[in-house]
Amino acid sequence: MGSLPLELERALIEVSNTLLKVGARWVLVGSTASYLNGLSVKPRDIDIIVEADKIYRVDEVFASDFLPIRRVKYSSNGIYSSHYGVFKVYNVKVEVMADLTICREYGCLKVEFEDLYSYSKNIKIRENIVKIAPLEWQLVANIMIPGKMERVKIILNALKTRGIDIEVLNNVLKHTPIKARKQAIELIQKYR
């Protein structure tokens, strides 16, 4: 992993500073979190999960400081359900969400913010501390998302090299539908 592209880094620092002003806890997820976890993926945007009781305050501040593309509101598209909004920061798309649930025909993964936050790791971007979702959490979330099998394989290869934090994996699996839980376990065993 090299450094983040400059525009993405600047946007992430600006987002981090703004969330600090608001007093909101948050976790970086998505391609940028994968990249910062050392995966060879191209970071495209910034995806963050915010604690639910601050999401509409975050929306207000983001809408005044950044370009709002879609103000935060609760929505569901059949796969994702969350309080969700999109903003542009230095021409970088920033997606904010809270109370995220990822569903498939066999059940739903409810992202428990407190668990995700407590297991996320701190990294430093310039002077800012950013919490990024652990690979174990990203693995299970990507198993639940259609079309993400390539990312799942990249995560599995990284976990094979670095080792799996069983406590983190068990924590996310307890919130996961049985079919996805079995698939995660089978894939992990296959890639060991």
Image: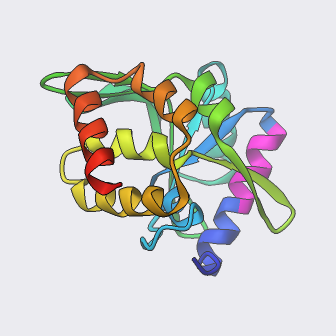
Is 133 magenta? The answer is: no
Left or right: residue 169 compared with residue 25: left
Report the magenta residues as a range: 13-21
Color encoding of the figure: rainbow
Q: Position of residue 14 (x, y in %)?
A: 73, 59
Identify the image quadrant of residue 156.
Answer: bottom left
Q: Position of residue 185 (x, y in %)?
A: 30, 37
Q: Position of residue 75 (x, y in %)?
A: 34, 27
Nearer-the-camera pick, 60 or 182: 182
Residue 99 visible? The answer is no
Residue 143 visible? The answer is yes
Residue drawn at x 35%, y 54% is: 192
Which residue reaches farthest right?
A: 127
Rendered-image quadrant of the N terminus? bottom right
Q: What type of secondary structure mainly makes up the magenta span?
A: helix
In the image, residue 55 sits, relative to residue 15, either above or below, namely above
Left or right: residue 73 compared with residue 87: left
Identify the image quadrant of residue 89.
Answer: bottom right
Residue drawn at x 49%, y 63% is: 161
In the image, residue 54 sits, relative to residue 35, either above or below, namely above
Left or right: residue 118 compared with residue 22: left
Nearer-the-camera pick, 157 or 31: 157
Q: Position of residue 65 (x, y in %)?
A: 69, 51
